[in-house]
Amino acid sequence: MIWRHEVVSNLSAQWSALNQEVVTCDKCPRLVRWREEVSRTKRRAYLDWDYWGKPVPGFGDRAARLCLIGLAPGAHGANRTGRMFTGDSSGDTLYSALYRAGFANQPASEARDDGLCLSDVFITAIGRCVPPQNRPNAQELDNCRPFLVRELAFLTNLQVVLALGHMAFDGYCKVLRQQGVAVPKMAFKHGAVYTFEPPLPALVACYHPSRQNTQTGRLTPEMLDTVFQDVKDLMHSL
């Protein structure tokens, strides 16, 4: 008989091993050079920061029913702080919405030691290193995909995947296809919901909370609140 605490302990060890593999990964020379260059030159406002400058692991509640998938770390956000969507305007928008929806204990995410805790949500990305012009190439995303596959497998309570942006949406669909799932043609449309045969989680599409999207009004706080309410309703119905 395998006792529950042994199962939990084993899964915790697997998470630790995965995160160690993520932060030490150097498979993509272009990204290694860029993330380190950004960390050396820094932004004027953060000259006193010791930039993270490594691949960024996922963050959140490992018992979560909801997984948020973004594109990649921001140059002076997660690449600086070492935590997904932390320290830039995208994170400001996202975490304030998570707080309003009851998924976070505070509305801001500024540093890894700022006391932020997430409940029922885990945050990750299809790419773990900051890419030049926010554009990882196909091979770089292929190199990163196994990390996402393993995270999703470890999230044993998962009911909903929320893809933040078109590239994250496509990246998650590639994960499904690589696992042999017959994924139908699905259009990326903000607020769209796609369901699969159990035990696969539902997929929800959302515009990325980038500065470009929020400043142009393409994504408003009200739109983001509506998405999270729809996600909560979906979780309750599954």
Image (cartoon, rainbow, N blue to C red):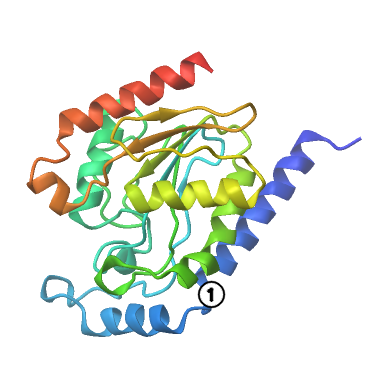
Residue at 30% over, 75% down: 50
Q: Nearer the viewer, residue 190 or 75?
A: 190
Q: Position of residue 157 (x, y in %)?
A: 60, 32
Does residue 117 appear in the picture of this structure? no
Left or right relative to 229: residue 63: right
Residue found 33% across the figure and 35% down from its top: 105
View extreme (front): residue: 185
Pick the front one: 182 or 42: 182
- Please provide percent x and percent y for residue 219: 17, 39
The answer to whether residue 153 is left or right of residue 206 is right
Q: Residue at x 20, y 30 (%)?
A: 223
Q: Residue furthest right?
A: 1
Label 1: few (<14), some (14–19) or many (≥20) C-alpha neighbours in 10 Å: few
Please state the horizontal and vertical placement of residue 27, each as a whole percent of the image: 53, 78
- Residue located beneath label 1 in the image: 24
Which image quarter holds the N terminus?
Answer: top right
